[in-house]
Image: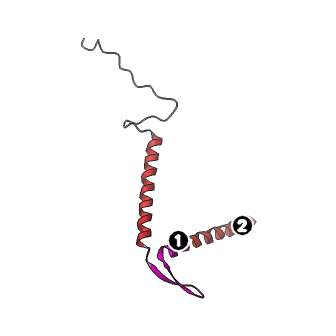
């Protein structure tokens, strides 16, 4: 028989201390880390483009005065004010339902 001189082929042993490695050499944790890094690069790139595209000056009229400021600051301050208002409204609604 031609295969008598070859050692018996055994299936690879499974590691018990960590995740199962994939065929390409990356385990599940490494794949998740690479996906997270790629998503982070994409989000930062889009954020930079957003800031650059909205860096022009605009005139904003407040109740008692007007100001010439960068559009990106108008967007950021509006988002922060909306977030703060949302938190306070959510707390008030939750408190009202808990009192019943």
Residue 100 visible in the current orientation: no
Which residue is nearer to you in this view: 61 or 26? Answer: 61
**In contact (CB < 8 Å): disc 2 and disc 1:** no
Residue under the point 50% across and 34% down: 18
- Residue ID for mark 2: 95
Residue at left offset 52%, top offset 71%? 76
**Which region shows up in magenta?**
57-79
Residue 84 on image: x %, y %: 62, 70
Q: Nearer the viewer, residue 8 or 82?
A: 82
In this view, 86 is above or below 66: above
Mark 2 and mark 1 lie on one chain; the one further toward the N terminus is 1
- In the visual, does 100 lie left or right of 30? right
Measured as percent of width and height from the top left, residue 35 is found at: 43, 49
Label 1, residues with CA under 10 Å away: few <14, some 14-19, many ≥20: few
Q: Is residue 51 above or below residue 22?
A: below
| Residue 72, magenta (yes or no) | yes
What residue is disc 1 on? Answer: 76
Disc 1 element:
helix
Circle 2 SS class: helix
């Amino acid at each position: 028989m031609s295969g008598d001189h070859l050692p018996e082929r055994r299936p690879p042993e499974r590691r018990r201390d960590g995740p199962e490695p994939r065929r390409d050499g990356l385990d599940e944790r490494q794949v998740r880390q690479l996906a997270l890094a790629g998503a982070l690069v994409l989000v930062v790139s889009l954020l930079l483009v957003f800031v650059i595209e909205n860096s022009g000056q605009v005139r904003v009229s407040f109740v008692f005065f007007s100001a010439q400021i960068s559009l990106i600051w108008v967007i950021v301050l509006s988002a922060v004010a909306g977030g703060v208002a949302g938190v306070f409204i959510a707390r008030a609604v939750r408190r009202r339902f808990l009192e019943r």
